[in-house]
Amino acid sequence: MNKQLKCIVIDDEPLARELIKTYVEKTPSLTLLGCFESAADAVKTVMEGSADLIFLDINMPMLNGIDFAALIPPSTRIIFVTAYDSYALQGFKVNALDYLLKPVSYSDFIKSVSRAIEWKAMSEAYSSTVHNDGSAPRMITLKVKNQLVQMRLDSIEYVEARNDRVIVFRKDSEPLPSIMTLKEIEDLLPTDTFMRVHRSFIVNIPLVEIVERNRIVFGKTYVPISENKREEFLSRLGK
């Protein structure tokens, strides 16, 4: 792991805080910016936006980790560290990168750090595709299994969330299953050409050729259009 990540540790339990601090200091790919016993103490450092990663306890007095996560800049990602696995769903709703259950083993810690490094690499790859004038990127980098795959935006017909998978369907190529969430992919796609037309589907509007009733036709596949999205979609399509 050669990608360097700047990180912050926040935990009100001294032993837990010291353990994560020790893990950070023994991991070459991490640099410790600060170690705090409360979210309130860490606010100034976090808001400076220089941290890539925060190891954040959830159950803390005054300002808990879930509430604090809503204040963290989007360029900084969170790995929650807590003794209560009941918080997992809440944690992922605020876009946590991972979730570690106390007592944290170093092997689990390293797995989470690896995810953070992959996220950082993907973010930088995406940024490198944006034009200097700030216009939409021509490429997108997606996480597929254990790889980062770069693809042209104009090759993507639609993206579907199917059961526990997200699949990217492309022109003249095999579909690609991604381990990213539909929301994560949606956030990377330029809104001037892509639109969420259904809770499970995002479409590339310039590639839409046929619309039948409340569905879009891509070859032999039908993509449904939600009733509350129909008017906006047809307007953007120019119908």
Image: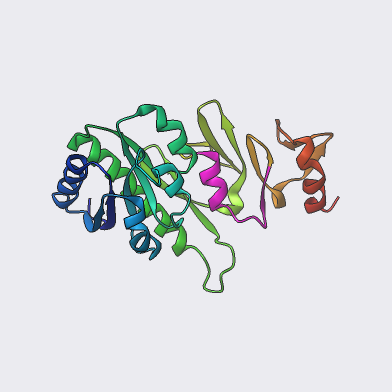
Pinpoint residue 123: horizontal percent, then vertical percent.
42, 55
Residue 207: tell me if it is visible. Answer: yes
What range of the chain is rendered magenta?
181-196
In the figure, is residue 4 to the left or right of 163? Answer: left
Pinpoint residue 169: horizontal percent, then vertical percent.
58, 39
Residue shown at 46% from the left, 62% from the top: 127
Residue 52: tell me if it is visible. Answer: no
Residue 185 belongs to the span the image colors magenta: yes
Among the 4 quarters of the image, the one containing residue 86: top left
Among the 4 quarters of the image, the one containing residue 161: top right
Residue shown at 52% from the left, 73% from the top: 132
Residue shown at 26% from the left, 56% from the top: 3
* Count of labels in the image: 0
Residue shown at 34% from the left, 41% from the top: 60
The residue nearer to you, when weighing 193 against 175, is 193
The residue nearer to you, when weighing 113 against 185, is 113
Pinpoint residue 23: horizontal percent, then vertical percent.
17, 45
